[in-house]
Amino acid sequence: MQLSLLAVGHLPAEAVAPLLEKFERIEVLELDVPPRDDLAAHRAELNRAVDAAANDWVVIVRERESVDAVLAAEIADAVRGAKAWGFRIRSEPLYTGKPLRIGSPAGELRLIQRRHFIRRGELAVQGTGVRLAGALRSLTFASAAEHRDHLAKTAVPHSALRRLLIFLRNAVLTRARDANTLRYLWIEAGFDHG
């Protein structure tokens, strides 16, 4: 089996190493798109990369994401079985080594059969599309201190009231209930103490 991998941003080899064990050959194409941008906003670049792919199946992996052994096996089974022409894959962000409960559980279209890829509008394939059970692992910050350092360089200062309102808004929108996600949102809002 062969696979084309579209790398969105810098992607080290160890991030996709489990895929190397499941496929005979993996072609890597780099997508010239900012790593966190919506792929639908860069359709021309995405279409060119899909057209340039040498293999029928294409998987898209963003910078700071990695594929574990379970997801690699699921991708290989999906390609081998070809029971659908597109597969949505969730990206599970990790903060201080633990999952963040942020983002859509539906995932994004990340594994596609090249010949069935629709080249206009929303990211879609002709025919059937399903969601894989596994998820890409996406590293955010290794520690709260690293997160604070990043914000010290990039964040816009706000009043205490505004920071509190930002935190409350984000907590309500994400429906955060676990301590790790709440700590992330607290620091992200600009509070220095975890």
Image (cartoon, grey):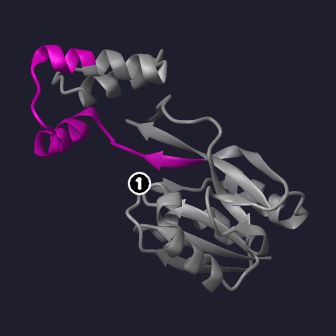
Mark 1 crowd level (few <14, some 14–19, many ≥20, 10 Å Cα)? few
Point out residue 75 in the picture as x, y percentages from the top left corner: 74, 59
Indicate the quadrant containing the C terminus: top left, top right, bottom left or bottom right: top left
Q: Label 1 belongs to which residue?
A: 36
Please state which amino acid type lies under the numbered disc 1.
Arg
Point out residue 188 in the picture as x, y percentages from the top left corner: 26, 30
Q: In the image, is residue 144 part of the stretch drawn in magenta?
A: yes
Q: Is residue 170 above or below residue 136?
A: above
Which residue is outermost to the front? 121
Foreground: 45 or 6? 45
Q: Is residue 60 left or right of residue 114?
A: left
The residue drawn where x is 63% and y is 58% is 123
Point out residue 45 in the picture as x, y percentages from the top left corner: 50, 74
Point out residue 84 in the picture as x, y percentages from the top left corner: 85, 57
The residue drawn where x is 45% and y is 39% is 94
Foreground: 170 or 101? 170
Indicate the quadrant containing the N terminus: top left, top right, bottom left or bottom right: bottom right
Image quadrant assignment for residue 104? top right
In the image, which residues are magenta?
A: 136-165
Image quadrant assignment for residue 193? top left
The residue drawn where x is 25% and y is 38% is 147
| Label 1 SS | loop
Q: In the image, is residue 154 part of the stretch drawn in magenta?
A: yes
